[in-house]
Image: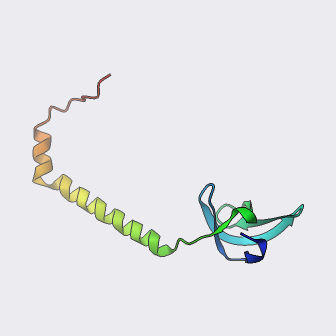
């Protein structure tokens, strides 16, 4: 990303580590432009940052999917099929050694 494209408050991501956040300040040190992110309070080279495209909607969707999966797992664990399967095992570990 070019330094001219960077703006305070802009959401960006550092792709090498996946760190994302809003730009708190922009600073030039020895001819290299850096941006400080609110998530880490560290400086990142502006030419290494990319605009962040993730929004809250994806996080909410992931959270809802996880809630649905947990509900299904609890329903299955409480069901008779799972309880019957537990009755037919001898509780030993067959993991080898």
Residue drawn where x is 40% and y is 71% of the image: 61
Point out residue 9 in the picture as x, y percentages from the top left corner.
68, 77
For image coordinates 72% across by 71% down, the residue present is 24
Rendering quarter of residue 47: bottom right
Residue 78: image location, x then y, percent: 17, 54
Compared with residue 57, is residue 20 higher up or lower down, i.e. above or below? Answer: above
Q: Is residue 9 above or below residue 93?
A: below
Residue at image coords 43%, 71%: 60
Q: Give the x, y percent position of residue 10.
A: 67, 76
| In the image: residue 81, left or right of residue 32 | left
Q: Where is residue 49 in the image (x, y as percent from the top left)?
A: 68, 65
Quarter in which the N terminus is drawn: bottom right
Q: Dividing the picture into quarters, in which one does residue 73 lie? A: bottom left
* 9, 33: nearer the viewer: 33
User: Quick one: quadrant of the C terminus?
Assistant: top left
Looking at this rendering, what residue extends furthest in the right direction?
A: 30
Is 8 placed left or right of 31 in the picture?
Answer: left
């Amino acid at each position: 990303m070019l330094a001219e494209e960077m703006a305070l408050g802009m959401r960006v991501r550092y792709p090498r580590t996946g760190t994302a956040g809003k730009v708190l300040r922009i600073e030039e040190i020895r001819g290299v432009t850096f941006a400080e992110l609110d998530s880490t309070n560290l400086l990142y080279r502006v030419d290494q940052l990319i605009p962040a495209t993730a929004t809250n909607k994806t996080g909410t969707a992931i959270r809802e999917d996880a809630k649905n999966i947990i509900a299904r797992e609890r329903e299955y664990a409480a069901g008779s099929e799972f309880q019957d399967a537990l009755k037919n095992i001898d509780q030993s570990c067959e993991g080898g050694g």
